[in-house]
Amino acid sequence: MSARKQTLLKRHRRQKRIALLLALVVLLVMAVVVAWWWLPLLLLLGWVAHEAWFADHLFYAPSDDYSYNFADGVPAFAGRIEAGCLRLDADIVAADTLILQVQLKTSWLGRWLDPFVLVGADRQDFERGVNGRRYLNLSGQNELLNSGKLQVRGRFCSIEPVVTLYALSNPNYAAQRLMVIAPHADDAELAAFGLYSRVVDVSIVTLTQGEIEAKPYEALGLDQAGAARLKGRLRAWDSLAVPLWGGVPQSQCVQLGYYCLQLPAMQAQPELGVGSRESGESDIRSVRAGNAIQLPGDADGVPSWRNLLADLAASFEHFRPEVVVTPHPQLDPHSDHVASTQALLEAIELSAWKPKTLLLYANHLHDNDRWPMGPAGFGIALPPAIEALPADGLWSPALNAAQQLDKAMALAMQHDLQGALPLKRRIRRLIQRVLVGRRWPATGDDEFFRKAVRRHELFWVRTLGG
């Protein structure tokens, strides 16, 4: 996490402690001066207000501008919103990814209800209290845009009339040989199920077995280590079996079997084997039986960075991908995700086969755990970027309703996304549904069913040199 974001997090926690202290003082005064029975009533109301309006993890100010630098040569078109419709100075001809830079200003209701922008039949949500530069995703709406009939209207926020449209053109990456790098089982589906399910030649390489946080499996009579081993086997099976729902045979899927949250430790000491934190295992071959190809790490089963790089290099040489889909190393802060892409880049240097393009995804963010905001089924606006990211390209292919449903069902097959919500979260959702108007899909309880099943998928495009 950057120094600026650490400062914001500290300020957020400090302000929360001050607010709680002031609230406690008020409650004690009310109890002494007015009547004691006000105390439990106000405590209850304060807790409900917290769950409705202050439970989001947002570690930047809603008034901060998002900061995106588009690469030189990306066409930018001046435009205006007139009578609720977007008018441009010129027609958009060949671009497949359309990003509209707008200036949003919240209304008073937008401080209590989620502000959003209606873009034709689409909807894209933003932070409560939004007041700054944001980026709408108009991809797939070229026809309405060129006809001057694309409606753009704010709800609980207003949009400044002057806007800028960035029009990005990409090759059809779905027509190229493609490999998806998944740090854990389900990362490939969350980020790219819509993409990989329509690629003819695709492979999926999952780096870890995802065995930790296996407490629910202890209810089966297992100790911590046994529960972790079972979870690792189940998620390893998910990584090989679930892609078949998207048309990817098991022979095109590889499970490397390294251990969850241990990739940074492996990277720090490349020759050292780093076993599981919870399962007691230290031999990656325990979940590799389903792999259709032999890999260097099969020789000794040591969970080391050296073996990981060799396994990835061998996977490149076997599947020969032209495009690799992998976590965004600057945007996605999960330690395994960052290490996965760093391992990928090191392995490319070792490999005789060199992919041409990286498509980068973010399944997590540093400072906003609700992005993409808003209900499932709608578009993906660009995520918060308070500090400027590298000026990569963008590619945002669309998913129709049938593809979105297939993606939701792929997520429903993942063991780590199953199970009921804890009681506290169920109560929080009920409060937010009633007071804030938030909605969650019927396809699954996990938050990823809302965040990942969308009108678009979104990738940052980075060309590899040489």
Image (cartoon, helix red, strand yellow):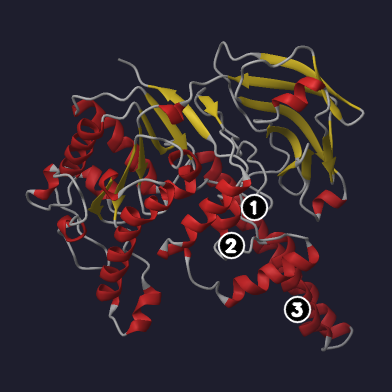
The spot of residue 406 in percent (x, y) is 52, 52
Q: Hey, which residue is sitting farthest bottom in the picture?
A: 36
Label 2 is placed on what type of residue? Thr
Please name the amino acid that badge 1 sits on.
Ala
Task: Give the number of the mark in front: 1 or 2.
Answer: 2
SS for callout 2? loop
The quadrant of the picture occupied by the C terminus is top left
Q: Position of residue 400 (x, y in %)?
A: 61, 42
* Structural crowding at the residue carrying mark 3, measured as other residues with C-alpha within 10 Å and reported as few (<14), some (14–19) or many (≥20): few
Q: Nearer the viewer, residue 463 or 457?
A: 457
> Is residue 44 depicted above or below 314 in this figure?
below
Q: Residue sitting at 62 percent across and 36 percent down?
A: 382
Label located before the other in sequence (3 or 1):
3
Left or right of 391 on screen, residue 206: left
Q: Which residue, given by chain and number where applicable, does mark 3 sit on?
A: 44
Q: Residue at x 82, y 49 (%)?
A: 110
In the image: residue 436, left or right of residue 459: right
Residue 416: quarter of image: bottom left
Residue 22 appears in the picture as rendered: no
Q: How many marks?
A: 3
**Residue at the spot of label 2:** 443
Dot 3 amino acid type: Leu
State the image coordinates of residue 401 (x, y, percent, origin top left): 63, 47
The residue that mark 1 highlights is 376
Q: CA distance from mark 1 to mark 2?
A: 10 Å
Taking depth in this image into account, of 180 and 258 the one nearest to the observer is: 180
User: Mark 3 or 2 closer to N-term?
Assistant: 3
**Marker disc for residue 303:** none
